[in-house]
Image: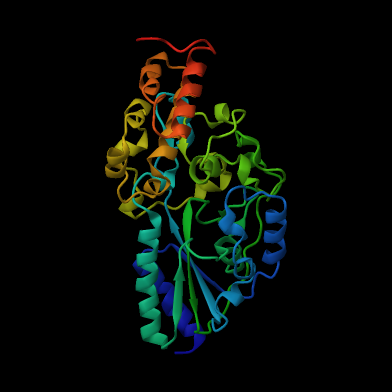
Amino acid sequence: MDGAALKAALSAEARAVGFAEMGICRPDAVPETAARLAGFLEAGYHGDMGWMAERTAWRGDPAALWPEAKSVIMLAEPYTPDADPLALLEERDRGSISVYARNRDYHDIVKKRLKRLGRWLVERAGCEIKVFVDTAPVMEKPLAAAAGLGWQGKHTNLLSRDLGNWFFLGAIFTTAAMPEDDPGEEHCGSCRACLDICPTGAFPAPYRLDARRCISYLTIEHKGPVDEELRPLLGNRIYGCDDCLAICPWNKFAAEAREAGYWARAELAAPRLADLAALDDAAFRQVFAGSPIKRIGRGRFVRNVAYAIGNSGDQELRYSVEALIGDEDPVVADAAKWACLQLSGGGDFPKDR
């Protein structure tokens, strides 16, 4: 089977295993990535994510990651929500969890599909493969754009005229040579909806993100207390933020999420903040078993919940957060004290209920 025929058969198989789109590029298709990454790190935009500064030679040059690779197969899998996640931001007694984290961990689902597709490719082409799902020093978004799956929008996420921006990316590096696709063309035009909606002003310029002000970073990656000036801007977002994704006009073409593992679990679609504040470590692990939320641990999660309660303006929730003032995790205790102060208008803590 020649390269073109192999690619056509692989594309059909990719759809059969559940991917919506496939594109191919060469490992050296994104030479500009190294300079962009260096600029991002030099500006300190990565915040506490020290791992981004590690193995920059591989991140900046995918060809260096595995020199024997001849093709990079990029695949897209939709996780489009069935309702507008922005609407939940008005329900201040509820917590807003990023759409991608309302059910099973996408790493497990996508990697299983990639391995299945990879086995098919090895059997047909007698080649070698390596699969990646956001778990290695691979710059998936630039590679996906080079492979024709879309373009990186002003919010730095990948956009597609066929899929919107609600989709995961997976990569298969292979020693099999196949024809490359034309790179995606940018179609943002003068639109700046994603930049204007950001609650914390995390975009210093179009196509540039300062993670230190990004709510997804603050609620997931950042381990300590969030700066007090930013806490009110979190609203009720307790894990991640979808504002810049949800507002994008290209989502009118968003593909339906066919994988049931991405459909929101009822208890995570709009969870009550009072219930989440009461979680101890064992209960947290039980509720979020199999979820990407489990990775950040109970302390960081309940810290976020306490900030959301402080932003709620709901006096009834004050009782839920008071119990956390004596939490053994000092970051949680600090967040609880701050929340009580917000709900009391800056007054003293109550001596009893």
The reply, left or right, for residue 32 in relation to residue 66 is: right
The reply, left or right, for residue 271 in relation to residue 163 is: left
Please state the horizontal and vertical placement of residue 351, each as a whole percent of the image: 40, 9
Q: Which of 3 and 337 is in front in this view?
A: 337
Q: In this view, does 346 lie above or below 262?
A: above
Q: In which quarter of the image is the N terminus?
A: bottom left
Which residue occupies 42% across, 14% down? Answer: 315
Q: Is residue 134 shown to the viewer in this render?
A: yes
The reply, left or right, for residue 62 in relation to residue 96 is: right
Q: Quadrant of the C terminus?
A: top left
Q: Which of 3 and 315 is in front in this view?
A: 315
Q: Is residue 26 shown to the viewer in this render?
A: no
Which residue occupies 35% across, 60% down? Answer: 109
Please state the horizontal and vertical placement of residue 270, each as a whole percent of the image: 37, 33
Q: In this view, does 245 lie above or below 347?
A: below
Which residue occupies 54% across, 40% down? Answer: 218
Please state the horizontal and vertical placement of residue 67, each as a whole percent of the image: 57, 81
